[in-house]
Image (tube, rainbow, N blue to C red):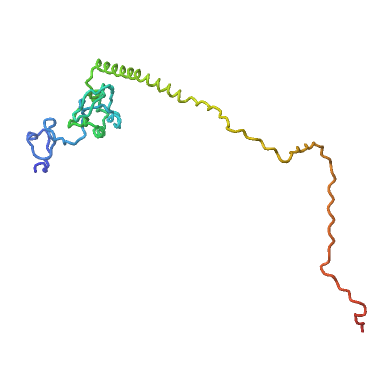
């Protein structure tokens, strides 16, 4: 109820200025703080013991604030709290909170839920480099040892697979050779040739002669034109005399 009342404006020089405890005013931070909600986007934290170094958080980050350097292992190195096997060492796992945009995508894609956002929101520093939080706990000597172990495992694996590759190549060469031609099969009977009934006479070859100039052919005579009707001739005396 008191927060709804406004204080009367007064000068700092007045004796009762600090005695006015009622009305709208700010809290005395950092001695007094407001409760932070559980679901908020604040400073990131990674539980490295539950991290399987899957690199999903670094890939989904829109500002590239997560830097990871993985080292593979030839065998299982442990399990997370939910029973997920771990096969990759985290030689480097840094989060630069100076670049973070607090989108929360990295906490969404994390399969083991080891990456979370804490309730800490005030982490102001004088040097911006202090905003880079390091979560990897491997020493330089241990990182070198694990890298050499993985390289040795890869060499042994390649040497063990070499004989199998050679055998496969040899078998492929044998199968690629063309099959041998089958032996010729002799017929069981000899066919008889039939004689032709009429002798075949070779046609004489036409000798090429030089073309001679010939006169143009005369057109055929046109047929006589017949009249359409035939006139009738009357005998003399049949015509009456003129009067």
Residue 224 percent location from the top left of the image: 85, 61
| 67 w.r.t. 195: above or below | above
Residue 73 percent location from the top left of the image: 27, 22
User: Given the current orientation, which residue lies at the most extreme front position?
Assistant: 189
Q: Quarter of the image for the N terminus: give it.
A: top left
Q: Residue at x 45, y 25 (%)?
A: 175
Residue 42 vs residue 1: left or right? right
| 237 w.r.t. 198: above or below | below
Residue 46 vs residue 233: left or right? left
Q: Find residue 232 and report its image quarter.
A: bottom right
Q: Quarter of the image for the C terminus: give it.
A: bottom right
Residue 8 vs residue 55: left or right? left
| 28 w.r.t. 141: above or below | below
31, 191: nearer the viewer? 191
180, 1: nearer the viewer? 180
Residue 123 percent location from the top left of the image: 19, 28
Residue 11 percent location from the top left of the image: 12, 35
Q: Find residue 185 and report its image quarter.
A: top right
**Residue 124 is at least partly visible in this image:** no
Q: Find residue 4 and report its image quarter.
A: top left
User: Given the current orientation, which residue lies at the most extreme top position?
Assistant: 141
């Amino acid at each position: 109820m008191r927060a709804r009342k406004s204080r009367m404006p007064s000068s700092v020089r007045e004796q009762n200025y600090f005695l006015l405890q009622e009305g709208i005013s700010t809290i005395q931070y950092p001695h007094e703080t407001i409760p932070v909600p559980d679901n908020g986007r604040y400073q990131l934290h990674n539980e490295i013991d539950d991290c399987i170094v899957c690199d999903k958080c670094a890939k989904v980050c829109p500002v590239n604030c997560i830097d990871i350097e993985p080292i593979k292992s030839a065998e299982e190195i442990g399990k997370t709290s939910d029973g997920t096997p771990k096969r990759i060492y985290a030689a480097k796992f840094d989060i630069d909170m100076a670049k973070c945009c607090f989108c929360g995508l990295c906490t969404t894609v994390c399969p083991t839920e080891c990456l979370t956002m804490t309730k800490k929101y005030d982490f102001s520093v004088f040097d911006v480099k202090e905003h880079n939080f390091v979560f990897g706990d491997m020493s330089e000597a241990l990182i070198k040892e694990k890298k050499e172990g993985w390289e040795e495992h890869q060499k042994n694996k390649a040497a063990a697979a070499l004989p199998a590759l050679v055998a496969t190549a040899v078998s492929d060469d044998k199968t690629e050779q063309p099959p041998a031609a089958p032996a010729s099969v002799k017929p069981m009977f000899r066919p008889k040739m039939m004689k032709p009934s009429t002798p075949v006479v070779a046609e004489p070859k036409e000798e090429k002669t030089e073309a001679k100039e010939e006169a143009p052919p005369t057109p055929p005579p046109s047929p006589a034109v017949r009249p359409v009707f035939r006139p009738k001739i009357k005998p003399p005396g049949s015509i009456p005399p003129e009067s």
